[in-house]
Structures are given as C-alpha cells and as structure tokens.
Amino acid sequence: MAKYKIAWLEGDGVGKDISEATMIVLKAVNLDAEYIPGDIGWEFWIKEGNPLPQRTIDLMKSTDCAFFGAITSKPKKEAEKELSPALKEKGFSYRSPIVLMRQLLDLYICLRPCKAYPGNPLNFKDGIDLVIFRENTEDLYSGVEFSKLSEEMLKIKGMEKVPKDAAVSLKINTKKGCERIIRAAFEFARKNKRKKVTSVQKANVIRITDGLFLETAKEISKEYPEIAFDSANIDAMCMWLLKNPFDYDVLVAPNLYGDIISDLAAQLVGGLGFGCSGNIGDNYAVFEPSHGSAPKYAGQYKVNPIASILAAKMMMYWLGEIELAKQVESAVAQVIKEGETRTYDMGGNDSTLDMANAVAKKIHSEIKK
Ligand code: IPM
Ligand code: MG
C-alpha cells in the first residue's frame, strides 16, 4: 500500500495539461502515493448543476491531501445562463467550487510563496522572495450576499440610509479567523528565519473589520519579538510592492486583499506561470497553481507548468517529504537558470510536457550523482 492517498483533481481547461505535467515530476521523485481522480469543474456544473459534487468532497475526506489543477469559474449570472433548462428549473445556484472547498474543509491558510528564480527572463527584479499568507475562509468571500433587503434588515442601526434595492455583500471577519492566519504567518516567519511580517488591510476606512485584523496583528506580533512587524494599507501596498519589493518579506492579509496582492506578487516573479498556492487547514490541504483554467489554451500543452510543479513541491513539504520537495525545487531552479527549455510565456517554444520532462531529467541526473 502506498504511504499517501492523494485526491487528484485535474479540473478543466489547462488544468488537465498541467496536471499531466506535474505527474511526470511526481513520478520522477518517486513520491510513494496513490493518486485518486476526482470530479470538479465546469463540466460537472453543466452536467449536474454542481461543479463540486458531494462524491468529490467525500473523496477528499478520505485522502491525506489533494492536488488541484484549474477550473473555469464565472460570475453567477453568466454561469447560470449556461445551465440547461431542466437543471435551471431545479434551482441550482453557482458558487466558485474552489472557494466552497476552502470553506467546507476549513482550509484557512492560503499560502502563496513568490520567489524570483535566477535566470527567469520574466522576473521584475532578481532576488524577490515574498511569502503571502492570505486568510482563506471569510471576509468578502463569506458568500453572504443580498440583491434586495428586507424591511427587517433595514431596521438595523446604521442601515436606515441604505436603499431597499441595494446590492449588499457582507465582509465578515472574526477574531478567531484573524488570529489563526496571523499566527500562521508569524509561526512561518519564526520557523524559516524570516525577518519581517507586514499586515495588509485598509483600517483607516474599513474601520471595524480591517480594524480588527490590524489590532489582532499588533497583539500577536508582541509574541514574536525577534520578527519585525509593520502594516500597510492595501492600496499603498500595491504601489510599494512595485517600488520597493525588497522591503517586504512575509505579508498577511484578509481574503480579498490577499487575493489581490498575491496576483501582484506573482507578476513580480514571472506571472501566473510561477504562482503556486497551498490551501491549508489543521488536518487537510489542497495544492494548486494560482492561475485559472485559460480555456483557450486547453489541450494545447502550451502553458507553463512550473506554477503547478511548485504547488506539488509545496504538497511534499506539507506531507513532510522535505528531501523530495527540495529535489523538485532545485530541479526547477536549474531548468530556469539554464534557460534551455522555455514555454511561450518565457519567450520559448517548448511545450508544457517539455518543461515537465526537463525538470524530471534534472531530478534523475541529480539522483544518479
Ligand atoms: C485565486 C482565484 C480564486 C479566488 C477565484 C478563481 C475564485 O482568484 O485562487 O486566487 O478569488 O480565490
Ligand atoms: Mg486570485
């Protein structure tokens, strides 16, 4: 029996291309795992009215962790337009399956390392090495939204001036939610000898929820005197990340701001072809590239699989297979540095699988040494 059981959720679009590429690398390091395929994505929304079927959630609950490729996610109205009349009648309503998965499995940490590997022609500046801790279960992603308001709601203090037909999405942040993501960021900084944690929010305007986040960060920072602490507003942070990326180290933010800065930071180190992501809870985790499913490239084996391969590297770290994770990262770094294999985003003509095979080849040659 294999040591690990991994739910293998390829998804749709280029999810399948990059999953195939990632499997080449997992086989090259010989991770002792059984990979169990699971259904997720657009196809299941169209066929069943549910892009994350219950059987997939059950599968995840019976495995150690999951690898997730990519899926198409669309605004509710657009998604529901594409549903067959028979399913529409049953009243299925669309929500992004990845967001649902994070909430159902309480994967409260979204860990997004953004490192500029030397030799990557897409690096904004060499040497950038940021780690983002994004809260992953609450905030404006809570899914509590209204397209019209009841009389009862309008009686709540402060709501008197809100028009009845206002669209409302609630930003819900709890003390526990703030604490656990901020603590995770500081613990990571301590363990990895990082120098600074920056809390990102907009507490000067969003006083209550972002105020809670900032105050909690200040409190927790006192428990880590060896780590510098500062905070920044999300808007200024976007500017400063471009201006002085070397001033930052570990960043921690509520869900939506974390989503925004993690795309920005990924672009600093080569774009979405390099952004990897771990959705991590206390007992389960899902690893994925941060990019979407790029349907126009589906099946063309064109996109860069490095984000996905680095997500698999994170998965091995999380499983405790540190040596294997290091082998993968070092092989990726060497392939980037040598620059002989490059996908289109890097200015080359090599395919998704060429890139994966180049990484696998490096792993084999290191093992032989
Ligand atoms: C991400 C993505 C998702 C998010 C989308 C696809 C729902 O942008 O993982 O960053 O907003 O979290
Ligand atoms: Mg995003």
Image: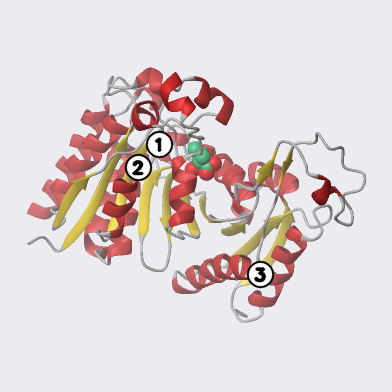
Q: Which residue is mark 3?
A: 175
Q: Which of labels 1 and 3 is toward the front?
A: 1
Q: In this view of the protein, can residue 126 be seen by the observer?
A: no
Mark found first going from the N terminus, 1 or 3: 1
Which residue is the extreme one toward the right?
161
Q: Secondary structure at mark 3?
A: helix
Separation of marks 1 and 2 at Cα, in angstroms: 6 Å
Question: 176 or 247: nearer the eye?
Answer: 176
Mark found first going from the N terminus, 3 or 2: 2
Instruction: Evaluate if marks 3 and 2 touch, with contact meaning CB atoms under 8 Å apart.
Output: no
Crowd band around label 1 with a 10 angstrom C-alpha radius: few (<14), some (14–19), many (20+): many
Left or right of 240 on screen, residue 42 = left
- Which three-letter amino acid code belongs to the residue tagged 3? Lys
Separation of marks 3 and 2 at Cα, in angstroms: 31 Å
Q: Which residue is mark 1?
A: 50
Q: Secondary structure at mark 1?
A: loop
Q: Which residue is mark 2?
A: 53
Image coords of residue 231 (percent x, y):
71, 61
Q: In this view of the protein, can residue 7 be seen by the observer?
A: yes
Q: Is residue 122 above or below residue 216?
A: above
Instruction: Evaluate if marks 1 and 2 touch, with contact meaning CB atoms under 8 Å apart.
Output: yes
- Which three-letter amino acid code belongs to the residue tagged 1? Asn
Question: 50 or 193: nearer the eye?
Answer: 50
